[in-house]
Image: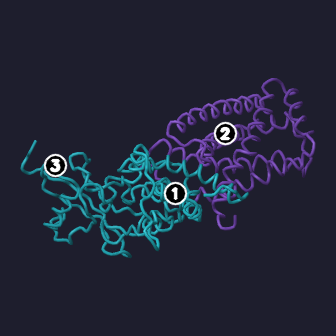
Amino acid sequence: MAEDHKTIRMIVQRQDEPEALPYEEEFEIPYRKNMNVISALMEIRRNPVNAKGEQTTPVYWDMGCLEEVCGACSMVINGKAMQSCTALIDQLEQPVRLEPMKTFPVMRDLAVDRSRMFDSLKKVKAWVPIDGTYDLGEGPRMPESKRQWAYELSKCMTCGVCLEACPNVNSNSDFIGPAALSQVRLFNSHPTGAYHKAERMDALLDDGGLQNCGNSQNCVQACPKGIPLTTSIAALNREATLHSFKSFFGSDYQH
Amino acid sequence: MAENREFFNRRLHSLLGVFPIGLFLMQHLVVNHFATYSPEAFNNAAHFMENLPLRVFLEFALIYIPLLFHAVYGVYIAFTAKNNLRRYGFFRNWMFMLQRATGIITLIFIVWHVWETRLAHAIYGTEVNFDMMATILESTFMFWFYIVGVVAAVFHFANGLWSFFVTWGITVTPRSQKILTYATLGIFIIFTYMGIASLIAFAY
């Protein structure tokens, strides 16, 4: 198969700055074996000449780990949001179309600003508070079976693919999206994290929270880490039902 | 509940869709189905409903007010979504889009249907019975308008019932949600059959 002149056709949606209008630029990249989208983009960076033979600016994108754990290199590849590091050229239909995830503000070319996701994590208190004025000592032990279950939820890398896939995360709504919801489930299940369950539930049911889910279930299909997002959402719905009854009628159950 | 206004509204929207609106829809289709037996059977069933105690109160408390809230808030929900079926053509995403589309169709249908059968009765004193429906459905256009309206309403109810179970945290796991998909599909088929059979009985 290895022909000398084989090339990859790539159409990249470009944008020079956050307020600029996007435009398309086509590239022809020499083929090498086992390329991923990032190595193809690196080829453009090495030799920034478009398909018409014109000199152009190198395409800009975000990346970090290159092994699908950091979540930085998400982009829309042939219509679907995914990680560009694990998107293999041999498995993609050509021309390969690259676009930024437009659910987020585009900074330049394929790089987006995912700040809103980190703000959401802060909003729902997606952490286990362990600092005190004295040594709090070891926390309670966690059964191994539960740890394995929680590990699946902890794989979330805040990559933004689920927000891009969700029809209810858009400029008309302030829905925080599936990723932060699932993190509430993770931290509420942690033996020490559970101390702050009620606080997280209050934050979760605030405007833009859990209730905005419309059950399209795209998130669970799109998630590159296979996190059971819709199961988390349904479980939180159950939790929210009980939580809202308690806060409406009052409860003497101490938690 | 002042702090969680949106949560309260969403949950109320979900609740009202089933209790009482969904129950009313099923009752309505069951009463209509008497038309397939004979015009008299339908008229008797309709008169039984008409003669229920506190009818006006029941109509407002169980139909008009819940329906108005469900409709107004539902239109808001429908127009905050940005559908992306072309990129994500999954089954549930189709249901998501159809739930919103049938909601709008059902709203248009119900506004017309309430005008024709309820307000016309209140204002002009039109008799509400089998003959009234037969006259309306004589027109081919109205017949198909009713078919589309009934199918949309039943779909919206059946799929909305699925969402209701998820929204209230009754079905959590993928397996339970899948079984519920089949159950609500059954509800959709049964009530669509009853609705269409009644319309055919009225018209022919």
Q: Amino acid at mark 1?
A: Ala
Q: Label 3 crowding class (10 Å Cα cut-off): few <14, some 14-19, many 20+?
A: few
Q: Amino acid at mark 2?
A: Val
Residue A92 percent across, percent down from the top left: 26, 48
Q: Is residue B195 left or right of residue A30?
A: right
Kindly check if marks 1 and 3 are in contact, taking CB atoms under 8 A apart as contact: no
Residue named by callout 2: B154
**Chain ID, cyan in image:** A
Q: Along the line of sight, which residue is nearer the eye, A224 or A205?
A: A205
Which quarter of the figure is the N terminus of chain B placed in?
A: bottom right
- Chain containing mark 1: A
Protein image colouring: by chain
Residue named by callout 1: A194
Identify the mark nearer the N-term, 1 or 3. Answer: 3
Which quarter of the figure is the C terminus of chain B placed in?
A: top right
Query: Which quadrant would residue B190 be assigned to in this image?
Result: top right
Q: Amino acid at mark 3?
A: Asn
Q: Is residue A51 left or right of residue A188?
A: left
Residue named by callout 3: A34
Dot 1 and dot 2 within a common chain: no
